[in-house]
Image (tube, grey):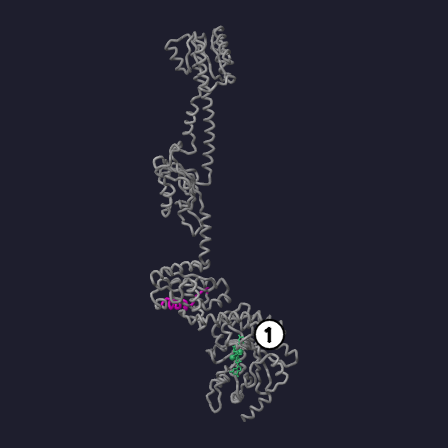
Amino acid sequence: MSETADPTSPSASFSRLLQGSGDASSRAIQKDNVRLLLVDDKPELLKSLFELVSIHGYIADQALGGQAALEALACNDYDVVLLDLIMPGVSGHDILEYAASQQLASKIVVVSGDASFSGVKHALHCGAFDFVKKPYEADALIATMETALKQCQLEERNSHVEAQLKESEELHRFIVNSSPDLVYMLDRDGCFTFLNDRLESLLGYRKDELLGRHYSELVDDDHLELARNIFNERRTGERAATNTELRLKSRLQRSGGRFLHAQSVWMEVTAKGIYQDNGERSRDTFSGTYGTARDISERKEAEQVINFQAYHDLLTHLPNRALLKDRLSMAITHARRNQRKLGVMFLDLDRFKIVNDTLGHTMGDRLLKAVAKRLQSCLRRGDTLSRFGGDEFTLLLPEVRSRDDVKMIASKILDRLNAPFILDGHELFVGASIGVALYPEAGETEEMLIQNADIAMYHVKGRGKNGFEFFSEEMNHQFTTRLAMERELRNALVQEQLCVHYQPQVDIRDGRIVGVEALVRWQHPTRGLVAPSDFLPVAEETGLIVQIDEYVQRRAFQDVQGWRNAGLGDVYLSVNLSATQLEQERCVANFTESLQQSGLPAVAVKIEITENLLMEDLEVIVPKLKELRASGLQIAIDDFGTGYSSLSYLQQFPVDTLKIDRTFVADIRAKRGDVTITNAIVAMAKGLNLSLIAEGVENRTQLNHLRKLGCTVVQGFIFSGPIAADELASLLGHNPFPELLASAIKAAD
Ligand code: C2E
Ligand code: MG
Ligand code: MG
């Protein structure tokens, strides 16, 4: 663009301005400010000239001859000089030449008797403003002089305005170029006619590269339509200068911003149409556009980060619950319209918590990322995998033809997840429980589908994990019952409805009560005493078992220490520990703290761990058992014989006691020799130098058989079932078991 088309340039309007003030002749002359010089070599003529101008109210300097005139002109600025031409020495022509050479602004009116054509021509050629012939008519002379004066004042005013405009133009140019925004101007065809200095630092182009080019060369391809909208003609009213967010192509390499396109910059663009002569806004009068563009990439990036965070899980970058729900609701609409099925899978990792608790959160996070990656490799186009937090993932399968489709995907996922994850040299096995809800049979809204997939997943967990199941109404019923139970159980903990019963463990050589096992009971307000098998599974699933176990242990430590203090004998205490409690990070610390508070010595406590639990989480549980044992506690394997522990494992475990499961004891019947398992377990315990307890001993046959095998400690209904603390205290005071034992042995003999 030429500099004159610059919107900041005043040139165009300047000429108008001059025109506007063109009727200067009508203006009155300010006579006091007028500076006049009268030049003549004849004193009388000079005098009469002076008198003439004086009569008209002017003050004038007089120069008698050319030399005096030169001196006066050298010292003063005159508006008008009335000059005689023919003078001896320095002539009027010399004065005219001098004035031209010095570029004097004075208007020179020649007053001369030499009215020859050449004289006049020469005078005008030398820059004389006008010519008045001598002898002059007074009015004509004054009129000519005043015309010269007006012209002079007009020129002065104009040069003043010009100076002001120049200053203003410089100011505007400075403001435009130092603006933090890009300032542009387009012609009616959309080509750049002006760009300010910001162009280079904002977008990396030189001005000459873009001037004359169409704006579309600068607009990101995706935004061309939008750009057309704002740069076209006929913007009126509200649309006259709207702010529009556009992406412009940039040559600058931008750092950071994974959400931004490296080659484009977000700009907020204003555009205002220019219409000729303030004419009506029409295609014909449209002559271009001007406006600004502001870099808003930082704000845009912040918005995009916030947007991403609102809809994604930041660890795995998978969609979060909100985004999944969005997509699910769209998929439901689609499936309904096309009478199709769709599937929602709820997936929970089986052993994530253990990894997180034992190897730390960093490792847990890495495992989750690795799991997310594997899961993604099982997806088809259009499927959405999302993380709901923790170790829960949800998978939306919008295109499902049959159950078999989903079965295949679920099996594939399980297969992939069953392969170990190797992280930092750790070989981690996770496995997953997957619940599936199909639209429309398992629900018609997103909430129902997600909830029912969740219920089906819980069902898989309850059945031993690592598998998948489709939701069914039956599950729903079980689920609601379980929910009610969970609520009640939480309440039971607060209201202290749980109590501890104790079952004696008896030395069958003399009938002494050597220990007691603490067993939890629920004193339910309407259902009476509830057995642990009725509520512990729910407690396990919900994690409430930890609070229950800790409560039972605290109570039992106090009770047993209380009996010791009361001189009722130094019985030891057996307590059951759940897998969930053992998996707690602070399990050992909490246990020993609670024990210390009660005053009961560690050697008086035996921890019972079921054999199955032991086999499940070897690498997590063994170190904890070692720690517990190191603090003086004893460890017993509960329900021994029902699990799969091999002899080699047994040797590694930090174990003191085996508790023969009552199913084997129940197998001991009169006149049947088929008790090989019990016999084998007793022999094994002896061989490994472990102590032995037989549980579930109900009759004399069992008692005597065990006695003959060399088993010394027995727990069972034959002596006593689990009883309340005060009953057990009185049993300790008056132990009837020696007599009971004696008669049993006698009967057997
Ligand atoms: P367990 O640890 O194997 O406890 C022995 C179970 O056998 C008790 O059942 C007891 O009442 C029962 N029993 C004892 N003698 C006989 C007998 O001669 N014949 C028969 N048929 N049964 C006998 P209970 O109290 O119903 O407890 C069931 C299981 O619940 C326990 O098995 C234990 O695994 C668990 N449990 C009980 N209390 C707690 C607790 O406070 N915490 C944890 N984690 N588990 C507990
Ligand atoms: Mg037990
Ligand atoms: Mg048992």
Residue 572 percent coordinates (x, y) = 59, 79
Q: Outermost residue toward the front?
A: 526
726 displayed left or right of 358: right
Measured along the vertical axis of the image, is residue 737 above or below residue 114? below
Q: Is residue 184 visible?
A: no
Q: Outermost residue toward the bottom?
A: 749
Q: Quadrant of the C terminus?
A: bottom right
181 and 660: which is toward the camera = 181
Dot 1 falls on a residue whose secondary structure is helix
Please name the residue that numbered disc 1 is placed on: 555
- Asked if the beta carbon under badge 1 is closer than 8 A to the nearest atom of ligand 1, the reply is no
Measured along the vertical axis of the image, is residue 738 above or below residue 459? below
Total numbered badges shown on the rendered structure: 1
124 displayed left or right of 491: left
Measured along the vertical axis of the image, is residue 400 above or below residue 509? above
Measured along the vertical axis of the image, is residue 435 above or below residue 51? below
Q: Outermost residue toward the right?
A: 566
Q: Is residue 649 visible?
A: yes
712 and 295: which is toward the camera = 295
Residue 274 percent coordinates (x, y) = 39, 36
Residue type highlighted by circle 1: Arg
Asked whether residue 405 is drawn in magenta, I would say: no
Query: In the rendered image, which quarter is residue 470 located in?
Result: bottom left
Residue 371 percent coordinates (x, y) = 43, 64
Magenta range: 408-424
Residue 120 percent coordinates (x, y) = 39, 11
477 and 16: which is toward the camera = 477
Q: Quadrant of the N terminus?
A: top left
What is the crowding at mark 1: few (fewer than 14 residues within 10 Å), some, or many (at least 20)?
Answer: some
**Residue at horizontal 39 percent and vertical 47 percent from the top:** 263
Magenta span: chief secondary structure:
helix
